[in-house]
Amino acid sequence: MSAKPVYADENVRKRIVRELKRMGVEVKWVIELGLRSISNSELLSLVARENAVLLTHDSDFTRVAIPESASVIYIHPLNSDEKIVELLPKLLEMTRSCRLIAVLADGSIECFAPRER
């Protein structure tokens, strides 16, 4: 599993944040940080500065350059909380080799930005 901290975007439900914490992941929820109105570019910069992972349902993050020091896990909103919880360990592990991971509407996982070796 990823040792990087995870920033959960404001669109990530509290149940998912609780599950990450239960798994022992250092998670920072945008809502709890008082950053509800932070812009996408500011959030991505924050995540990159902290060498962290961003967990989001916002597809806008699939269309921007992801800095080498960051990872983005985009989960299509049609995926159930149960499916997301099931996939979390695998997704976090994938951040070691991929900067942009997407869970598509059918639950399949794609790596769209492999890390440079």
Image (tube, rainbow, N blue to C red):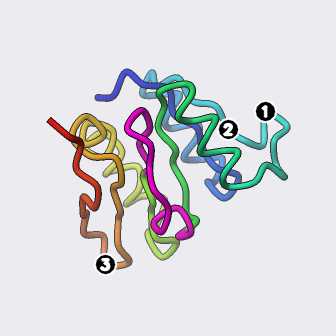
Q: Amino acid at mark 3?
A: Asp
User: Which residue reaches farthest left?
Assistant: 117
User: What is the crowding at mark 2: few (fewer than 14 residues within 10 Å), some, or many (at least 20)?
Assistant: many
- Residue placed under numbered mark 2 in the picture: 29
Is 116 in front, or is 12? Answer: 116
Which residue does the image show at 47% across and 38% down from the upper left? 53
The question of residue 10 being in magenta is answered with no
Q: Are marks 1 and 2 in contact (CB under 8 Å)?
A: yes
Decide: is 41 above or below 50.
below
Q: Nearer the viewer, mark 3 or mark 1?
A: 1
The image quadrant of residue 113 is: bottom left
- Residue placed under numbered mark 3 in the picture: 106
Decide: is 88 above or below 105.
above
Residue 22, percent across and down? 49, 28
What span is colored magenta in the figure? Answer: 59-72
The secondary structure type at the circle numbered 3 is loop
What label does residue 83 carry, if any?
Answer: none
The image quadrant of residue 84 is: bottom left
Q: Amino acid at mark 2?
A: Trp
User: What is the crowding at mark 1: few (fewer than 14 residues within 10 Å), some, or many (at least 20)?
Assistant: few
Sequence-wise, the earlier of marks 3 and 2 is: 2
Which residue does the image show at 75% across and 54% down from the upper left? 39
Residue 93, percent across and down? 25, 36
The secondary structure type at the circle numbered 2 is strand
User: Separation of disc 3 and disc 2 at Cα?
Assistant: 26 Å
The image quadrant of residue 35 is: top right
Q: Amino acid at mark 1?
A: Leu
User: What is the crowding at mark 3: few (fewer than 14 residues within 10 Å), some, or many (at least 20)?
Assistant: few
- Residue placed under numbered mark 1 in the picture: 33
Q: Quadrant of the C terminus?
A: top left
